[in-house]
Image: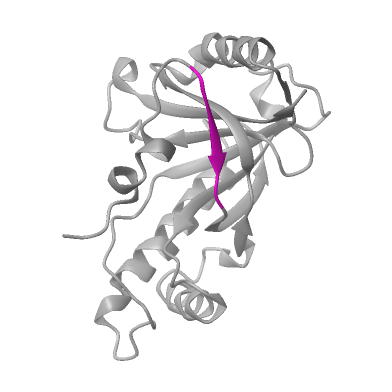
């Protein structure tokens, strides 16, 4: 059976609705940066297409003559996103047109610069109009965080964020959102195929000890 990160790393991908602390390990991601409302931005839709195009090309590299060293079959991990506002404020959901974001998908440990460059070449041939130069491979260090599972509409996330922020205060931590440590969302469902009330989104906020 293909390796499924969501099942093997339940602490990362199956948190409870009640907030909890997690120390997130270093992980390899393909990332694409952008700005704008994810519901209307062509830039965001293009980023998602790039990420899935490259991720599935890596998955299917098992059929290549020169299969990557250390390759193992896997289920493509879920789409994730780091979010902040262009003016640096934390007034979430006030104006989505001011969103800045990094969309990303986790990659197996065997994915290195060579593997990444090879699939970039393949995808460029298949989709020459897609600007895949926007993509990069990065080792992401997130560290200590508080996370919770949010159920339902993305627009209702503030209620879960409030619970996370209260947990942070009550348990001797302080928020550490700054630089690359951002408001982090992990999307466990495809919103095009899932009823809004059944959507599951992991919300993760970086913290440090008070």
Quadrant (top left, top right, bottom left, bottom right) of the N terminus: bottom left
Q: Which residue appears at 34% of the width and 24% of the height?
A: 199
Q: Which residue appears at 70% of the width and 17% of the height?
A: 172
Give the magenta part as a residue range. 19-25
Residue 207: x %, y % from top left: 69, 29
* 45 or 140, nearer to the observer: 140
Residue 53: x %, y % from top left: 41, 61
When asked about the image quadrant of residue 36, the answer is top right
Main structural element of the magenta stretch: helix, strand or loop? strand
Residue found farthest to the left? 1
* Residue 201 shown left or right of residue 88 in the figure: left
Residue 201: x %, y % from top left: 43, 27
Residue 70: x %, y % from top left: 36, 78
Q: Is residue 162 magenta?
A: no
When asked about the image quadrant of residue 127, the answer is bottom left
Residue found farthest to the bottom? 65
* 96 or 25, nearer to the observer: 25
């Amino acid at each position: 059976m293909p390796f499924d990160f969501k099942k093997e790393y339940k602490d990362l991908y199956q948190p409870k609705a009640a907030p909890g602390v997690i120390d997130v390990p270093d992980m390899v991601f393909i990332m694409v940066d952008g700005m704008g409302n994810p519901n209307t931005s062509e830039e965001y839709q293009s980023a998602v297409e790039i990420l899935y195009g490259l991720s599935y090309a890596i998955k299917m590299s098992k059929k290549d003559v020169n299969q990557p060293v250390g390759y193992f079959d896997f289920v493509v991990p879920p789409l994730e996103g780091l979010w902040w506002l262009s003016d640096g404020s934390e007034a979430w959901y006030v104006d989505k047109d001011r969103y800045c974001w990094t969309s990303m998908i986790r990659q197996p440990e065997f994915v290195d610069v060579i593997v990444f460059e090879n699939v970039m070449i393949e995808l460029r041939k298949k989709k020459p109009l897609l600007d895949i130069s926007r993509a990069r491979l990065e080792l992401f260090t997130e560290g200590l965080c508080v996370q919770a599972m949010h159920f339902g509409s993305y627009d209702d996330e503030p209620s879960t964020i409030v619970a996370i922020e209260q947990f942070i205060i009550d348990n001797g931590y302080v928020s550490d959102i700054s630089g690359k440590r951002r408001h982090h969302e992990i999307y466990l469902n495809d919103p095009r195929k899932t009823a809004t009330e059944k959507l599951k989104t992991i919300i993760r906020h970086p913290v440090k000890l008070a």
